[in-house]
Image: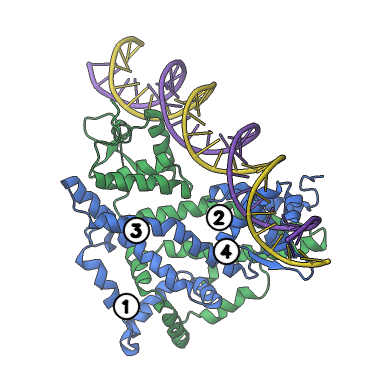
Chain colours: A green, B blue, C yellow, D purple
Amino acid sequence: MKGNMNNLTPLAQKFILHFGEMGSRWGINRTVGQIYALLYVSARPLNADEIAEHLAFSRSNVSMGLKELQSWRLVKLLHQPNDRREYFEPPKDVWDIFKALLEERRRREVEPTLSMLRESLLENPATDSDRHAQQRMREMYELIELSSSWFDDVQRLSPDTLASLMKMGSTVKKLLDVGDSVRGKLGFGRAAEAQAQSQDDDAGRGSGGGDHP
Amino acid sequence: MKGNMNNLTPLAQKFILHFGEMGSRWGINRTVGQIYALLYVSARPLNADEIAEHLAFSRSNVSMGLKELQSWRLVKLLHQPNDRREYFEPPKDVWDIFKALLEERRRREVEPTLSMLRESLLENPATDSDRHAQQRMREMYELIELSSSWFDDVQRLSPDTLASLMKMGSTVKKLLDVGDSVRGKLGFGRAAEAQAQSQDDDAGRGSGGGDHP
DNA sequence: CTATAATTTCAGAAAATCCTGAAAATTCAA
DNA sequence: TTGAATTTTCAGGATTTTCTGAAATTATAG
């Protein structure tokens, strides 16, 4: 008796369907998107059978979907007293979800490219055209490396700090200027840092440790 | 006479092949990824026939790929003197590429979700479970809306400002604290702003700060 | 250990997406 | 205009991805 989502209110249906569609624009498939959406709006953890029932998917499909979601760290497995089955729920705090998403996405979409670029930049350019290509790759490498490690840093901030940072919006820029005007007294210099990298082609984002007091 | 990428040096091949693979993890397909990679490392603009030749794709496939890349604003169309054919090249500055990417991605991946959420939040919850679902949606909505408009702001900064911002990494946090200590004198307050939203309706995560150092 | 409940694996059917060649449409020089 | 050069469209074959049911595996209660 597989109900076609008929145990769900229209509101939930809409949400779940949307995540199914969206899933594909993302890197995950419809099934996974829907499972996630269902868990996200559910008032309590669900087990695989319940999910299969709600969404009218085969049990095995749900199993795979949950595996995938776990690998993204978007759901956590837990148990109910007196019940052998595995239950699933997403992290409570949306900010944790957000961070997990960014982190995992970086790991899968960005890291491999960084490695490839790193390797390519070590190779010996065979032709003029290779030399040009390598220069382009270097530019790409530097940008990715920079934004990537920036994410790293920012990600370590607490949700609250993160939130207030964002609420400032472009005020950050002003702050940045203020920073310039007061940095002397406080002992962390931006100007120096900013200079450092843009000149020499130091592939590998220089010394690393030094720059974050 | 379709060469199997044999007019490309191993270095370029590697790069192009990688972007092909990666493309799928992204939302674009292999072909589009490769076309982009080829243009990116090319020392001069290329026309569709040249691309088809280099990559051994059908002419029509290249045509579609270029359309797609244009819709992402990742390549620009241009003409050579005395040549009717259309030539293509990516933006020179990697930062422009980066921004185009983020912007377009937001438009396609985020905006639709925001609309859906906005609509859903207006609806009348039919059940208790709906009420809960709506609350979860609200949390999601707020987070996305916040980070999205933050991107908006940051995106408007010049590449240079953006770069130095990133080079600061988590130093931003320090700056933020300094900002607190001097904001009175300077007339832009973070505390006030930050407070505004997080209080009145943050059912989501209790007072926050505690669990994240 | 055995029996049963629960989960995972996996071959291949079903569905979705990509890619091509041929035909249609567009552009522009003459 | 005309017609050659160039680009676009699109039906359908080729490929890839998703999804299922059946069988295999794992876990646990008794």
SS class, disc 4: loop
Left or right of A52, for residue B152: right
How many marks overall?
4
- Circle 4 residue: B73
Closer to the camera: disc 2 or disc 4? 4
Q: Quadrant of residue B198?
A: bottom left
Q: Residues within 10 Å of mark 2 (few under 14, many from 20)?
A: some
Q: Position of residue C29 (x, y in %)?
A: 80, 67
CA gap between label 3 and label 1 equals: 28 Å
Image quadrant occupied by the N terminus of chain B = top right
Residue found at the very far bottom of the displayed protein: B185
Q: Quadrant of residue A154?
A: bottom left
SS class, disc 1: helix
- Circle 2 residue: A110
Tag 4: residue type? Arg
Question: Is B39 above or below relative to B157?
Answer: above
Q: Position of residue B75 (x, y in %)?
A: 63, 63
Residue A200, visible in the rendered structure: yes
Tag 2: residue type? Val
- Circle 1 residue: B190
Tag 1: residue type? Arg
Q: Position of residue B105 (x, y in %)?
A: 48, 59
